């Protein structure tokens, strides 16, 4: 058997993705989902819905498979999906995009993020500013790209960044400000002053902005505002989204990135050597979804709001302090009032104690900062209301 080249191991290990013995570190999500499977606990850990999305979208995928849409699609994505993404950006945000130049289809938002960071980070001194806690792939990809992560803390209970912290983090070394709004894991929707300051700082320090907007249609209080729509932002902003959360098709992995042609081309140059293309029959199906009527888009946030409130009430009754999210699939609760001092230990015990799985917020923070989140736990609200009621009943045993 041939040895795995040492350089590969060094690179992945250097990025902290492989343990000292060469073993792949399981993510906390894999660990907790395995725990859910073993104990039969309700899995409020990983963020995926337990109901199918719109019937037309599912039917369009079935029809595409039946009609032979099963081979490699074009590198940028099928023209109909490129057009549907451009129409969506115009319809919801007033952005006028050329589908042939400003849009690229990717294997989920995750590939768009990876390709964008790998394409745009040029030199080892480049810094990526992220808001912490953060979606875990941000740190992994920044490390694989060889860049330094600089974090802006989001603090309990509203998780809005402090503008002075933001100003201190962005410098001439900043290559990318990576924004996720609505935010996973906290459910925060950034205030308009925060978005404005991000654009101002990017301009002042000549940084690029990459925004992850996968929860764009799951904001509860007001319509989502993409940073790319702010004055002066378009030329330096790449906007990422995907169909997974909006259409409850997280397993399809159809994502996209939009922005000025030179930036999108740079991402395409990397993306063509990651997956090249993916999901040909799912691409027309997501195009169908993006063209659904306003009634569909109007109700999905409302349905999730009901779930958020069911989960929040259950958590409060069980004795947690709860941060009320303004968007996304998630609710963060403080287990401190229940006597917890270590959220990771609390989450490892929770399935056996009451039959519910959740994720410690420390999983979304750099080890040096994890103490800031040591009693905080993320619960996913994107489950059927009966499931959330059952989870609430089980959690009430903690009170
Ligand atoms: C903030 C954020 N970005 C990206 C993703 C992944 O998106 P996709 O499944 O389209 O790759 C997720 C999924 O949980 C997420 O929460």
Image (cartoon, rainbow, N blue to C red):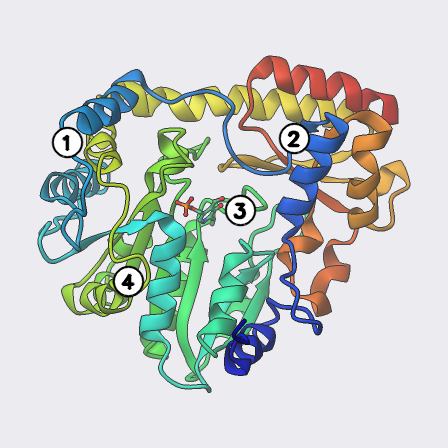
Asked if labels 1 and 3 touch by Cβ distance under 8 angstroms, the answer is no
Task: Name which of mark 3 and mark 2 comes first in the sequence.
Answer: 2
Q: Give the SS element for disc 3.
A: loop
Asked if labels 1 and 2 touch by Cβ distance under 8 angstroms, the answer is no
Give the mark toward the camera: 4 or 1: 1
**Is residue 199 at least partly visible in the picture?**
no
**Distance Cα–Cα, label 4 vs label 1:** 25 Å
Answer above or below: position of 319 versus 3. Answer: above
Task: Name which of mark 3 and mark 4 comes first in the sequence.
Answer: 3
Pointer 2 local density, CA inside 10 Å: few below 14, some 14–19, many at least 20: many
**Is residue 267 at least partly visible in the picture?**
yes
The residue at the point 27 percent across, 41 percent down is 279
Residue 387: name its quadrant.
top right
Task: Name which of mark 4 and mark 1 comes first in the sequence.
Answer: 1
Give the mark toward the camera: 3 or 1: 1
Q: Which residue is mark 4?
A: 271
Q: Give the SS element for disc 4.
A: helix
Rendered location of residue 178, percent (x, y)? 43, 63
Pointer 3 local density, CA inside 10 Å: few below 14, some 14–19, many at least 20: many
Q: Quadrant of the N terminus?
A: bottom right
Q: Which residue is mark 3?
A: 184
**Distance Cα–Cα, label 3 vs label 2:** 17 Å
Q: Which mark is residue 43?
A: 2
CB at mark 1 closer than 8 A to ligand 1?
no
Q: Which mark is residue 251?
A: none
The residue at the point 51 percent across, 82 percent down is 7
């Amino acid at each position: 058997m041939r040895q795995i080249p040492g350089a590969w191991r060094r690179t992945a290990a250097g990025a902290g993705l492989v343990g000292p013995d060469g073993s792949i570190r399981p993510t906390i999500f894999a660990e907790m989902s395995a725990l859910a499977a073993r104990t039969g606990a309700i899995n409020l850990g990983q963020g995926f819905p337990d109901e199918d999305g719109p019937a037309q979208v599912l039917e369009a995928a079935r029809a595409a498979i039946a009609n032979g849409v099963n081979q490699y699609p074009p590198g940028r994505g099928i023209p109909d999906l490129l057009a549907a993404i451009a129409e969506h950006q115009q319809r919801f945000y007033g952005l006028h995009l050329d589908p042939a130049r400003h849009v690229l289809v990717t294997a989920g938002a995750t590939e768009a993020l990876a390709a964008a960071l790998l394409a745009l980070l040029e030199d080892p001194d480049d810094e990526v500013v992220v808001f912490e806690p953060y979606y875990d792939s941000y740190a992994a990809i920044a490390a694989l790209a060889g860049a330094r992560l600089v974090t802006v803390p989001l603090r309990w209970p509203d998780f809005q960044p402090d503008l002075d912290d933001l100003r201190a983090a962005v410098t001439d070394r900043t290559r990318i400000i990576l924004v996720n709004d609505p935010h996973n894991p906290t459910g925060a929707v950034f205030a308009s002053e925060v978005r404005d300051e991000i654009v101002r700082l990017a301009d002042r320090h000549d940084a690029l902005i990459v925004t992850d907007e996968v929860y764009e249609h799951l904001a509860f209080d007001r319509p989502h505002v993409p940073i790319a729509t702010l004055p002066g932002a378009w030329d330096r902003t790449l906007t990422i989204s995907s169909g997974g959360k909006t259409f409850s098709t997280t397993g399809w992995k159809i994502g996209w990135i939009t922005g000025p042609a030179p930036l999108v081309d740079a991402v395409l140059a990397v993306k063509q050597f990651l997956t090249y293309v993916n999901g040909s029959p799912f691409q027309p199906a997501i195009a169908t979804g993006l063209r659904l009527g306003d009634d569909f888009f109007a109700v999905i946030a409302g349905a999730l709001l009901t779930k958020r409130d069911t989960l929040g009430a259950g958590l409060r009754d069980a004795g947690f302090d709860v941060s009320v999210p303004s968007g996304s699939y998630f609710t963060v609760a403080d287990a401190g009032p229940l006597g917890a001092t270590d959220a990771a230990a609390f989450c490892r015990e929770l399935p056996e104690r009451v039959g519910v799985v959740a994720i410690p917020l420390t999983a979304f923070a750099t080890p040096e900062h994890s103490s800031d989140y040591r009693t905080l736990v993320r619960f996913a609200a994107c489950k059927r209301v009966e499931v959330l009621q059952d989870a609430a009943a089980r959690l009430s045993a903690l009170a």
